[in-house]
Amino acid sequence: MSDQPDELRICPNCGQANALYTLRCIRCGEELEGLFALEGFESLSEPAGKEPEEDLAPMADILASLDESPLLADENKPEEESLEKAGGTEDGQPEDGKDDPDWLERIRQRAKEEEDAAGALAMGGIALDDRRSHEGRKQVDEAFDEIMRRIREQNEREKARRSRRVESDLVDENGDPEWLRRIRELHPNREDDSQKIQADASVTDSLDDEWTEEELQELLRREIGLPETPDEEAEETITQEVPTPLLPTDEHKPSLSEPIAENFEEEVLQAEPDPEDFHNIPEDDDQTLKNELRDDLPSDEVEETLLADENQTEAALEPDLEESAEPDETLVNEKDGEPVEALELELDSEPEEVSPDLLLLRNQRDRASVFTDIIGQEGRRTIAVLREHHHQSKIGRLVLGLLLILGVILAILLGPPGSVDLPSPAPGMSFAENLNSIDPDEAVLVVLDYQAASRSNIEPLAARTMEILEEKGASLHLVTSNPENLWLDPNQVPDDFIPAGMLGYLAIATGASSSWGEMPIQQALKGDLDLFGEVDQVILISDSAEFVRMWLEQISPWQPRIKTSVITTPVSGPILLPYYDSGQLQGFVAGLADASNLDVEPQTLINQRAYQVGMLLMIVILLLGMITKADEDSQRRAEEQNR
Amino acid sequence: MKQRLPVIIAAISGLVILAAFFFQPFTAPYLGLVLNWAIIVSSVALLVAIAGLFVTHIRFILKGRRGFLYSIILVLTFLATLILGWYLGLDDPAYLIGIQTVLVPLENALMALIALILMSAAVKIFRVRGWSVLTISFGVSALVFLFLNLGFFQFDSIPGLGAIVSALQRLPLIGARGLLIGLGLGALLMGLRVLFGQEALRE
C-alpha cells in the first residue's frame, strides 16, 4: 500500500487536495493549520456485546486512554506498540469478532497477513496519526484541555440539573413544590398569574407524578447517547438498578447554590409566557451545549465541533455521570442501602482507546473522500503541470534510436560507399594552394593533437597531406604533446613528445637559451633543440579549435614568419573561420567534406552513404520533434477551448 | 600575507610574461626560465594526480567499497600499460595495436553517444522551452545546415540560390567571430584582475 494518500489534506475552503505538510492551500491560499482533528475521541460508541464491567472506567483511565491514543503518542514511543494495537486482538480488543461486520474482519485479516504485526494496510493510517501527533502536539494538548473543560462544565450543569430535580420534588404541606413557593416569593404582585401557574403546577405535579422510571431511563439513554429503543436487557438493567429519586428527608436535602438558584428562576421565568411548554424536565444538555457552541464559535467551526462533540459525548458523559452519580448514590444509600455501581456501569461509556480498526476506517474514509474529489476534478487542472511523463515517450525514444542505428547500418552494408560531392569552401582551397606552394627545401613542422574518436575524420586528410609533402621533398618533423598521438597512427609516429602541452610549445617558441645551460624542456627533445629554428610551415592536425586558437594567440606571435595551416574536424571549422579571414591561417580543411580539395581517394574515406543517411535521420528526428510539439500545443488549445 | 602571497606571485608572473613579450631580446631568457618552472611544476602535478588516482582506487579495493570491481580493472589496466610500455617500448607494434584496440572503440562509442544525446536534446528543447525565438532559430538553422551538408544538391549552378547559400554558409563566421571576441574580452578582463591583484584565489 502506498503512503501517498496519507500525504493529502483537504482544504476546508475549496476542497483542494494538498500535501500533508502544506501550511496553505495551493489553490486558494487558505490556512490548513485548522485541519487538525481529534481522531482518538471519535467512535466511542459502545459495542453491542460489551460487558458492563468493561465499561466502568474512572477519569484516570480516560486520561490514560488518551495518552495511549496513537494521536497523542510520543514520537519516541516504539512504533511496534502502535502496530500491535493496530493488530487488533491483543490488548483491550474484543477477542470475539462474531458481531463484527465482514469488511472489518477482512481488514483485520489483511492486517494480520502483512509482513509486520500491523501490516502495510494499517501503517499508513498509523503513520498519519504519528505525523499529526508529532506536528500538532501542542494543538492536541490544547484540544485536550478544551475537552476537559467542557467535561467539567457539563458536570457542573448536570449537578445543577439534578439538584433542581431534587429541589423541585420538595413540596410543602399544601402540596406546592419548593420551586413554586420561590416563584411566588419573587413575584408577589402577580398572584393571578401565580394562581394560574399554580393551576399549571398541578399539571406539573401530575407531570411529576408521571415522572416514571421509563422517563428517567429515556432521559439517561438520551444523556449517554444510547439508542432510543434499547434492548430489553439494558432496559431491564436500568429499571432494576436505578430507583426513582424519592423525596429526601430534610437532613439530606441538598442546598442549592445561589447561582444555580438564579439560573433556575430565570428558566422558570422564561417558561412563564408559554405555560404549555412548562415542565420540570430540564432542557437537553446536548442541545444546550450545541447552542452555546453556536454562540461561542464561528459558524464554520460549529459544525466541526458539533460533529466532534457527538463522538466525544460518551467520553464527556462518563466522568460527568460518574461525579453526578454521587448525590444519587448518597440518596439511594440512605434510602435503599443499595449501591449504584450498576448505574455507573451502564452510564459508563467506552473510555478505552479507539480501536486501530476504527482509526483505519476513518483514514480510509478520508482517503476515499480525497479520491472522490480528485476523480471529480479529473480533466480540470488546478495548477500548471510543467512536464507530463508518458510511457510512450520512452518507447518513442527507443524506436528513434533503433531507427537511427538501423539506417546507418543498412547504409553501410548496402550499396557502394558513395563519393563526396560537396562544394569546395574557400579555406579548403587555400589550404590546398598553400600545400602546393611548399618548396622542396622547406621544413614543415607537423603538430599532432587529436583524439582517437576523430581519427577517421582527420587521418585520411593528414595522410594525404604527408604524401604530398613527401612528394615535394619537404623535410617533415612531427611532434605532439598528446600521448594518444604516440599510438594512433603507425605511419605518423611523432619525432618528439613535448611535455606540458601548450606550455611546452610556448617555452620552445620563445627560442631563448640561457647562458647557464639547457632548460628542462630542451632536454626532452631528441633532435634539434631549436624546434622552430628552420621551420617555414606549421601544419596543425587537431580536432580542437581551442588548441588551434591557443597556438595562433600564444605561439605564432613568437614566430611570426612561420605560416600556419590546419587539418581539423567539421565541428571546429566554423571557429577557425575568423582566423582564416584575418590571414593568421593560410587555410584549413575541416573533415571529409573538404577531402575533394586534396584529391583524397574515395576508398580511404568513410562511407559517404552512411554519413548522408545519418544526416537525413537527424533531419527527420528534428522535424518529428517540432511536429509533435506543434501537435501537442494544438490539442491543448482545443482542450482549453472545449473546457 | 598567507592569502596574498599567491596573488602577488601570480601578478608578478603575469607582468614578467607581458614584459617579456614587449622586450623580447632582453627578457626572453627569463621568460624561458619561468616557463620551465611552470613545466616542471605541471609535470610533477601530473605525477601526483596519477599517484593519487592509483592510491585512491587501491583504497577502494582494500575497503571493499561498492563498485570496487571497477577499481580493480583500473589498477590492473594501469599496471599492464605501465609495465608493457616500459618493457616493450612505446614504438613496439604489438604494444601499439593493443592500445589502439582499446582506445579507438572506446572513444568512438563515446562520440556516438554524444551524437545521440545531442540529437535527443535538440528534439527535447522544443518540449522543454516551448516555442521561442531561440528554439525556432535553433531548429531552422539546424535543419538548414544539415540539409546543406548532405551533399545531395549543388546550389552553385543556380544563380540566385547560390548567392543565398553562400551567404548562409558565412553565418557561422559571424557567430564564431562574436564568440571569439567575447572570449578575448573575458581573457583580457581576467588578466587585468590577476595583474592588479583583484582576483582572489580560492582554496
Image (cartoon, coloured by chain):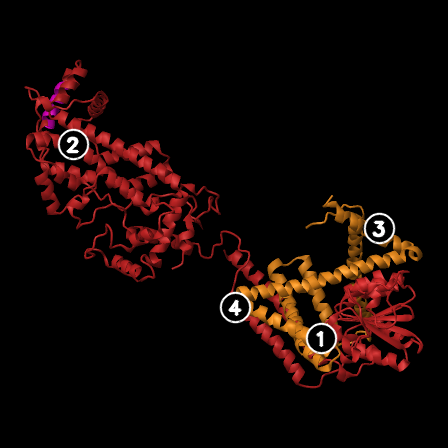
Q: Chain of mark 3?
A: B
Chain to which the residue tagged by mark 4 belongs:
A
- Label 1 and label 2 in one chain: no
Residue A549 position, x and y percent, is 80, 63
The chief SS type of the magenta part is helix
**Residue to which mark 4 is pinned:** A392
Asked if the magenta segment contains residue A198, the reply would be yes
Q: Tell me which chain appears orange.
A: B
Q: Can you give x and y, in whole percent of width and height, for residue A104 in the image?
A: 26, 57
Task: Compare residues A279 and A398 and report the one nearer the observer.
Answer: A398
Range shown magenta: A194-204
Left or right, residue A398 beside residue A286: right
Could you say whether the residue bearing mark 2 is in a helix, strand or loop? Answer: helix
Cα distance between the residues tagged 2 and 3? 101 Å
| Chain identifier of the red chain | A
Q: Nearer the viewer, mark 1 or mark 3?
A: 1
Q: Nearer the viewer, mark 4 or mark 3?
A: 3
Whether tag 2 and tag 4 are in contact, CB under 8 A, the answer is no
Question: Which residue corresponds to mark 2?
Answer: A326
Snapshot quadrant of residue B198: top right
- The numbered mark at residue B86 is 1
Q: Position of residue A425 (x, y in %)?
A: 82, 72
Mark 4 and mark 1: span between their CA atoms?
Answer: 54 Å
**What residue does disc 3 label?**
B15
Calculate the distance from the C-alpha at mark 2 to the C-alpha at mark 4: 74 Å
Q: Chain of mark 2?
A: A
